[in-house]
Amino acid sequence: MNTSSATAVLACLLFALAPALAAQSSVKEFRLGGTARIISEDCIRLTPEEYYASGSAWFQNPMDLEYPFELTIDLVLGDNDDLGADGIVFVFHPTMQTGYRGEGMGFAGLYPSLGIEFDTYQNYHLGDPVGDHVAIMPHGQVHHARSLAGPVEVGNLENGAKRPLTIGWHPGEQVLKVTLDGKTVVSYTGDIINEIFGGNSKVYWGATAATARKLNYQDICIRKLVYALGD
């Protein structure tokens, strides 16, 4: 059996042995904070188009990183391009806490944590590139000198469109992969359980967003969530 075949078999076994798989498409299982509001049966608006807003949506059941997961979501980052900010971060954290707003996007300051940021504003002092970008960040660090992967420019995200997003974790390969509009935009290979979470495999996941002196409405629309529940 070649390496790729063995990996595929291992992934299938991990799914088969998972204690419980959650397949979720409802927004009702999320704990909302700040300005976050349900706007449809599938969508949560994390921030309205207001200055200095901050919102969060945390799925209330923890996941177990010993097993694979796949989160499929539509991402909406508003339609205010030139004056829009700040972005959305998908956060993994042992508790459902939210960090600093503004350029921190509700992720800054959280330890231990892992964040996948979709940043729509260039903060020069944080090492941001000119364009909208994606990065994988550790421990509430928002300066790109600390990035685990990225930043990768992905074109204009602030066009009002729903952008299909998939975040997948494969523990056999120890690969975290982020796919946007059907293309892999950033990935990270590493022992997340031990190197990020100190051996704790049970974490919560959520989405956080913020505005400051520039603003946008920022939404997530849940399509499919599949992972092992961390009892």
Image: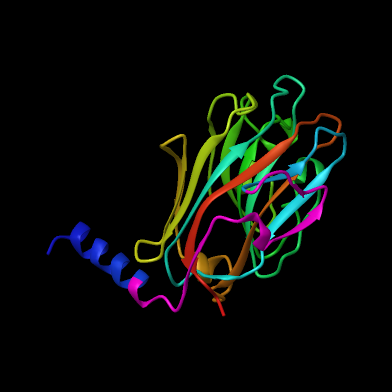
Q: Position of residue 32 (x, y in %)?
A: 76, 57
Q: Position of residue 103 (x, y in %)?
A: 77, 40
Task: Specify the color scheme.
Answer: rainbow
Horizontally, residue 62 falls left or right of residue 183, namely: right
The outermost residue toward the top is 82
Horizontally, residue 188 falls left or right of residue 134, namely: left
The outermost residue toward the front is 41
Q: For residue 120, which quarter of the picture?
A: top right
Residue drawn at (72%, 52%) of the image: 107
Frontmost residue, 63 versus 142: 63
Q: Position of residue 129 (x, y in %)?
A: 62, 29
Horizontally, residue 122 falls left or right of residue 10, namely: right
Frontmost residue, 20 versus 167: 20
For the N terminus, the quadrant is: bottom left
Horizontally, residue 92 falls left or right of residue 174, namely: right
In the rendered view, tell whether residue 142 sits above or below residue 60: above
Q: Is residue 22 magenta?
A: yes
Residue drawn at (73%, 32%) of the image: 123
The outermost residue toward the left is 1
Numbered marks: total: 0
Q: Position of residue 26 (x, y in %)?
A: 60, 56
Frontmost residue, 161 versus 186: 161
Q: Is residue 90 magenta?
A: no
Residue span colored magenta: 16-41
For the C terminus, the quadrant is: bottom right
In the rendered view, tell whether residue 79 sits above or below residue 143: above
Residue drawn at (76%, 31%) of the image: 216
